Amino acid sequence: MTKPSIVVADDITADMQSAIGGGLDAFNDEVTGYGDRLPLAVLARHPSTNTIIGGALGRSSLGLLFLDLFYIHPEHRRGGLGTKILQAFEAEGERRGCVAAVLYTINFQAPGFYARNGWQPFGEIPCLPRGTSRIFMSKQFIRTRLS
């Protein structure tokens, strides 16, 4: 039997995502007996132009809510919009039955914002440039319990 070739790519195509993501999803579904993964977007739109001015992107899977990306245009920060988006994101996770949420942020981004909203750090890994680190945080949802 010939050995597989190893290919390195910096572009993820739909067929790559399907083969790897789909394969892992099928494996997880087989082991757990169910598949509950869903993408999640919570968006803020400008009232007159309807353009997206910020929001949160993530997903839920196996009872965990993953906050992957969060951004608000600088003109719309510091007025409570971020908290409203985060609360809507968390509420949808709870509605989906998630027991906790996880994210990572960078030390110059928003760890204080997440902490003020009840998120707890559980790990930190230094990265580049020097003095920068990724901070991993989680939040337990009170209303939901593990069975």
Image: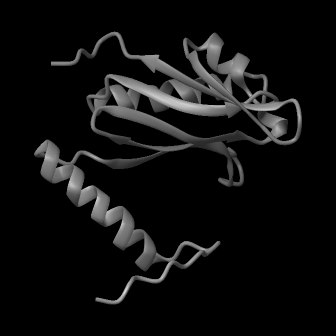
Q: Is residue 98 above or below residue 42?
A: above
Q: State the quadrant of the C terminus.
A: top left
Which residue is the extreme one toward the right?
130
Q: Is residue 8 above or below residue 77?
A: below
Q: Position of residue 84 (x, y in %)?
A: 58, 25
Q: Tell me the quarter of the picture where residue 56 sits.
A: top right
Q: Residue at x 63, y 20 (%)?
A: 114
Q: Position of residue 9 (x, y in %)?
A: 61, 75
Q: How are the residues colored?
A: one colour
Q: State the quadrant of the N terminus.
A: bottom left
Q: Is residue 75 above or below residue 16?
A: above
* In-image side of 80 versus 136 (left or right): right
Q: Tell me the quarter of the picture where residue 64 sits.
A: top left
Which residue is the extreme one toward the bottom?
2
Which residue is the extreme one toward the front?
1
Q: Position of residue 48 (x, y in %)?
A: 71, 49
Q: Residue at x 61, y 33 (%)?
A: 104
Q: How many marks?
A: 0
Q: Position of residue 69 (x, y in %)?
A: 61, 43
Q: Is residue 123 above or below residue 26?
A: above
Q: Nearer the viewer, residue 34 or 134?
A: 134
Q: Nearer the viewer, residue 47 or 57?
A: 57
Q: Tell me the quarter of the picture where residue 32 sits.
A: top left
Q: Nearer the viewer, residue 35 or 70?
A: 35
